[in-house]
Image (cartoon, helix red, strand yellow):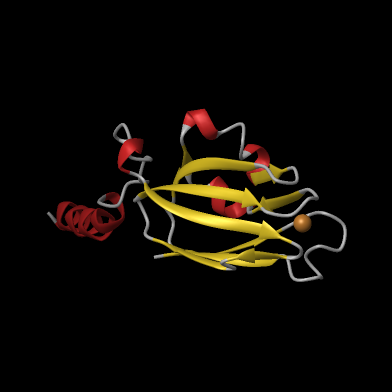
Amino acid sequence: MRFSSLAACAALLVAPAAAQPVEAPSPRPPVDWSAAQSIEVRLQNFSYQPASLTLRANVPYRIHFVNVSSGGHNFTAKEFFAQATIDPEDQAAAQGGSVKLDGGQSVDVRVIAHQPGRYKTHCTHFLHSSLGMTGEILVQ
Ligand SMILES: [Cu+2]
């Protein structure tokens, strides 16, 4: 009797932990990319316009990157792209978390951010970030 009530008590103590199984990543439904909101980011010597983007989590966006300068730039945001879903068609353009553009080039990346937070972005070309080519993406 005493043992069984102890066992019941132990079961109660264990129950809350048992009620919180490790969450498996929930399967994500297919995305309707045609509903993506458009945002334009201009890359120039030596800044992003705008330097700060605000995105809502779990909302599809089409980010239109335009390099308006004659030299190459990139938009490197590894942590941002790592937590995001990128349209399979655009994954090559954002390979390794970096969108690379030659002078005058433009590219679209359709993306859904999932994890709210602040993510840094910068251009990895020599000295570009120290000249001001940095920015942030705020996911709300
Ligand atoms: Cu640059």
Residue extending furthest top? 89
Residue 103 place in picture, x, y as percent: 75, 46
Residue 28 appearing in the image: no
Residue drawn at 65 percent across, 45 percent down: 99
| Ligand 1 lies in quarter | bottom right
Quarter of the figure with residue 42: bottom right
Closest to the observer, 133 or 82: 133
Q: Is residue 17 above or below residue 27?
A: below
Q: Quadrant of the C terminus?
A: bottom left
Q: Total marks drawn?
A: 0
Residue extending furthest left? 1
Quarter of the figure with residue 2: bottom left
Residue drawn at 46 percent across, 55 percent down: 39
Closest to the observer, 67 or 21: 67
Residue extending furthest right? 126
Residue drawn at 61 percent across, 50 percent down: 66
Q: Is residue 55 above or below residue 27?
A: below
Residue 12 place in picture, x, y as percent: 20, 58
Residue 35 place in picture, x, y as percent: 30, 42
Residue 33 place in picture, x, y as percent: 35, 37
Residue drawn at 55 percent across, 53 percent down: 80
Q: Quadrant of the N terminus?
A: bottom left
In the image: residue 99, left or right of residue 26: right
Residue 17 appearing in the image: yes
